[in-house]
Each structure stands twice: as C-alpha cells, then as structure tokens.
Amino acid sequence: MLRTSPDLLTIKALSELSNTHRQTIHYYLRRNVLPPPVRISKTSALYNKSSVELLNLVRIAQEKHRLSLAEIRDLFRESGYQSHR
C-alpha cells in the first residue's frame, strides 16, 4: 500500500476500516461531509485517517438518530468542523 504518512490512507483502506463502500465515500466528499483527499496523481488520492471516525459518526447519526446528510453536515459545521480542511 502506498503511503506518504502513517496518517494517510488509500480509499481501499478507508473503505475497509470504516466498513463504508467507496461510492458512499465519494458521495460524502461531493456533499462536503468529508475533507478532500490529498491528490497524489490524477487517479489516486490519500485520505486522512480521521475520516474513519467521521464516517462512523455519520453512520451513527443516520442509523440511530435518523438524521439526513444535510443535518449531519450542519451539525459538523456548528461544532466547528470544516470539511474543506
């Protein structure tokens, strides 16, 4: 696995660690729920390890609290989280 830092993951590793499909991760990126990855080429990117925890929080908010993705994004913003960082 290609890594430039122990805090960065490939999408495959992020998907496996968070038990989240790749397509779902890409969808959350488009919706500004997750921070953008570090691009290492046109087709490859590395994701911050903290994204695993964010994906788990999103899952809990959706499944247990029945929040929409927009509501989750708003909660993240209200707590000071900025997805573009």
Image: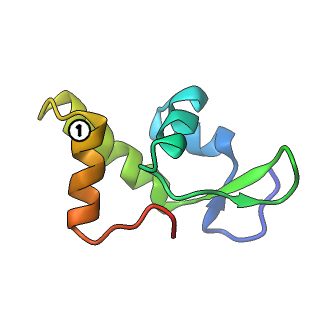
Is residue 84 at least partly visible in the picture? Answer: yes
Residue at left offset 70%, top offset 49%: 10
Question: In which quarter of the view is residue 2 placed?
Answer: bottom right
Question: In which quarter of the view is residue 5 placed?
Answer: bottom right
Q: Which residue is mark 1?
A: 60
Q: Give the side of residue 12 with respect to residue 42, left or right.
A: left
Q: Give the side of residue 77 with respect to residue 82, left or right.
A: left
Residue at left offset 45%, top offset 42%: 31
Kindly identify the amino acid type of the residue bearing the numbered disc 1: Ile
Number of marks present in the image shown: 1
Q: Give the side of residue 24 with respect to residue 68, left or right.
A: right
The image shows residue 68, relative to residue 29, as above or below, that is above
Q: Position of residue 13 (x, y in %)?
A: 63, 44
Residue at left offset 47%, top offset 52%: 34
Q: Badge 1, how many Cα within 10 Å: few under 14, some, many 20+? A: few
Q: Give the side of residue 40 with respect to residue 61, left or right.
A: right
The image shows residue 59, relative to residue 6, as above or below, that is above
As helix, strand or loop, the secondary structure at mark 1 comes to: helix
Question: 82 or 44, which is in the foreground?
Answer: 82
Q: Position of residue 40 (x, y in %)?
A: 83, 59
Question: 76 or 64, which is in the foreground?
Answer: 76
Q: Position of residue 76 (x, y in %)?
A: 27, 58
